[in-house]
Image (cartoon, rainbow, N blue to C red):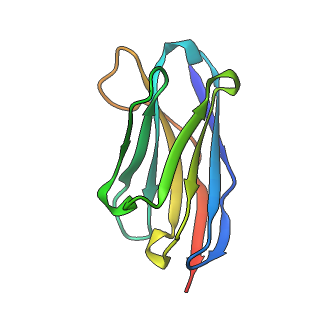
Amino acid sequence: QVQLVESGGGLVQAGGSLRVSCAASGRTFSLDAMGWFRQAPGKEREFVASIRLSGSNTNYAEFVEGRFTISRVNAKNTIYLQMNGLKPEDTAVYYCAARRVDAYDYDYWGQGTQVTVSS
């Protein structure tokens, strides 16, 4: 099993920045990739960004538009999402997720951290 704990959410004004973190514990050696998803009230959960845990491959949703950067520190089993130029529509609960090497989809999820962007 893998446990994921997010931190760093909060309230920020439009145009501001925020960084959220996700620390993984447990069988982290079984992981291939980690990522961030978000869910706004009344909307479905959507993909934000992902990063492979070896190499430098990253992927971003189109709406990120170069504003967000995903990174990792393997020694800490931690990934980060640096969010700049935040917009009110970025308001959501941000979830960390992890995918095992032999899995097709993400099968470990954190509890989520609230990000609120005021206009």
Q: Position of residue 96 (x, y in %)?
A: 53, 42
Quadrant showing the N terminus: top right
Q: Position of residue 26 (x, y in %)?
A: 64, 19
Is 46 on the left or on the right of 83, as rendered?
left
Viewer-closest of 3 and 8: 8
| Residue at the extreme bottom | 119
State which quadrant residue 14 falls in: bottom right
Viewer-closest of 104 and 65: 65
Residue at image position (49%, 56%) is: 68
Residue at image position (46%, 61%) is: 67
Residue at image position (57%, 41%) is: 110
Q: Position of residue 52 (x, y in %)?
A: 43, 28
Is 84 on the left or on the right of 39, as rendered?
right
Q: Tell how many labels.
A: 0
Is 108 on the left or on the right of 18, as rendered?
left
Answer above or below: position of 63 versus 81: below
Quadrant showing the C terminus: bottom right
Residue at image position (37%, 55%) is: 45
Answer above or below: position of 2 versus 66: above
Answer above or below: position of 18 versus 59: below
Answer above or below: position of 76 versus 4: above
State which quadrant residue 65 falls in: bottom left
Is 47 on the left or on the right of 85, as rendered?
left
Q: Position of residue 63 (x, y in %)?
A: 34, 63
